[in-house]
Image (spheres, grey):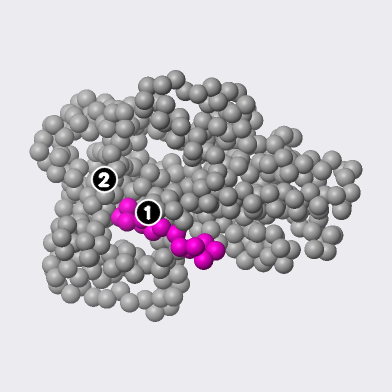
Amino acid sequence: LDFWALLRQERLKPQSFRKIPWTMHQFRRFFNTARIPAEGKDELVCKFLTEAEESYSGESPTHIVVLQGGRIFTFDLLNERREPLTAAEITAQLDHIDNACARLGPGDGVGILTHGDRDSWAQNRRLLRSLHPDNERCLRLIEDAMFVLVMDDASPKNRQEVMSECLKGDCTNRWLDKSYSVIVFKNLTLGSSADHTPFDGMVPVTCAHYVHLTYLATKLNPDDGTVRAALPEPEELQFQLNQTLVSEMERVKMEYYALCDNLDVVCDVFTGYGKGFMKPVRIHPEAFLQVAIQLGYYKLHRKPAATYVTASTRAFYHGRTETCRACTPELVDFVKAATDGTTSLTRVVTLLKESVQKFEKLMVECCKNHGCDRHLMGLALTALEEGMPLPDLFLDPAFVKSGGNGNFILSTSCNGYTPLIGCVAPMCKDGYGVFYSIEENRIIFAMSAFKDSDETDARALYENIVHALFDLQGLLLSAKL
């Protein structure tokens, strides 16, 4: 709620990279945003307004939606004087919801429908709206809400279990169209899930880091405030369903859990060292991690992997990302030399330096919008929209093998330099998702792989990356860099 106020008052410090200011446009779609399903192409709807915009554009919705036990509730986070509720008042509202769920038992879990393929959900949403006027109102309240708060019955015991529940948890207790969902588990561990459409990963990371730092600063002396006055009780949003929708919910649930059962998730912490070791040897932490990931993959699979790394183009108006293709000839030369057992230490170190320099050069170019993938994507989309045949490049096996058309074997991204970590599924069947947060003395990894692949093993890749990190440390210490 404090972070929401920062955005509303336009007081969040603008982010920058190498003294170049970055666009903050994505942050306005963090709250009050939903992806509305439509056949062919969804519609992104954002109702968030700053305080300055409210003077001429209406009011920004201030209610949230709470999901618990398959039931859906809503209440306003501001009182009748437009003051934010205190922690004590929010607790009282959540207690009402918890008591209602205990009394009423499991609900219908209509959020299941949001887990289906988008065209099916578009058709089911249209049917849902047509059945009763109340359904239209419930959908509008959910889609306009600031965000979703999930009160989940699971009790994950560690990072990996939290990650797994956030990626593939109880589908009766999620509403995937919403831009952001905070998930509070029964044992009070926390997680979140987000739709990637409105914004990139650093937006929820920024919010979560703000919340984390606020908690650390206030946990010894929390100010919960008081219940200042009686509040309207939370309202339960109840949908009218028919047998068609009930059957669709069962179908979607089966398909969803089949997808979940096929996804392996690993989340672990490397404690050998962190960026505190990388800086004195004059290697940028992200470049260091990309070398370690490629070396670990090569150790496991004995071949290089086409690699996607997120490069931010937020130096441009409304910029999002470009693909930094990290598997360069220089990096391949290094991993081969580092594993062949015959190349001299001096030569291996030289190849390491060359691969790092190439990665850093590519990353800077991509951040300047000098990469190739977004331009190629624009060409492909233009051809499709104009009814033209796709250029031969996009059908060439070499382009696909290089990662084109969404076929990067390693889909990687740095989650920043905080204790927070996130993860998504791999791009392709024989690929991996590899995500990392780099702290001073440790590195947090989150990895994903599909179980029906005969090639991939997320845990084995993590263990080989750990070996690679120690190998790199030994190499650099031996070279006395």
Image coordinates for residue 465, horizontal then vertical, percent:
68, 47
Quadrant into which the C terminus falls: bottom right
Spot the residue most to the bottom.
Answer: 221
Which residue occupies the foreground of this view, 276 or 283? 283
Amino acid residing under circle 1: Gln
Q: Are marks 1 and 2 in contact (CB under 8 Å)?
A: no
- Foreground residue among 219 and 148: 148
* Quarter assignment of residue 205: bottom left
**Residue that carries the numbered disc 2 in the rendered image:** 45
Q: How crowded is mark 2: few (under 14 residues within 10 Å), some or many (20 or more)?
A: some
Q: What stretch is highlighted in magenta?
A: 16-31
Q: Is 76 left, or right, of 4 in this rendering?
A: left
For residue 218, say whether it is visible. yes
Q: Does residue 269 appear in the picture of this structure?
A: no
Which residue has dot 1 on it?
Answer: 26
Q: Is 471 on the left or on the right of 195, as rendered?
A: right
Q: Which of 165 and 275 is in front in this view?
A: 275
Q: How many C-alpha atoms fall within 10 Å of the one at disc 1: few (<14), some, or many (≥20)?
A: some
Viewer-proximal residue, 373 or 452? 373
Residue at the image position 81 percent from the left and 52 percent from the top: 350
Give the residue displayed 81% in from the left and 53% down from the top: 349
How far is the residue under mark 1 from the one under mark 2? 13 Å
Going by the numbered disc 2, the residue's amino acid type is Val
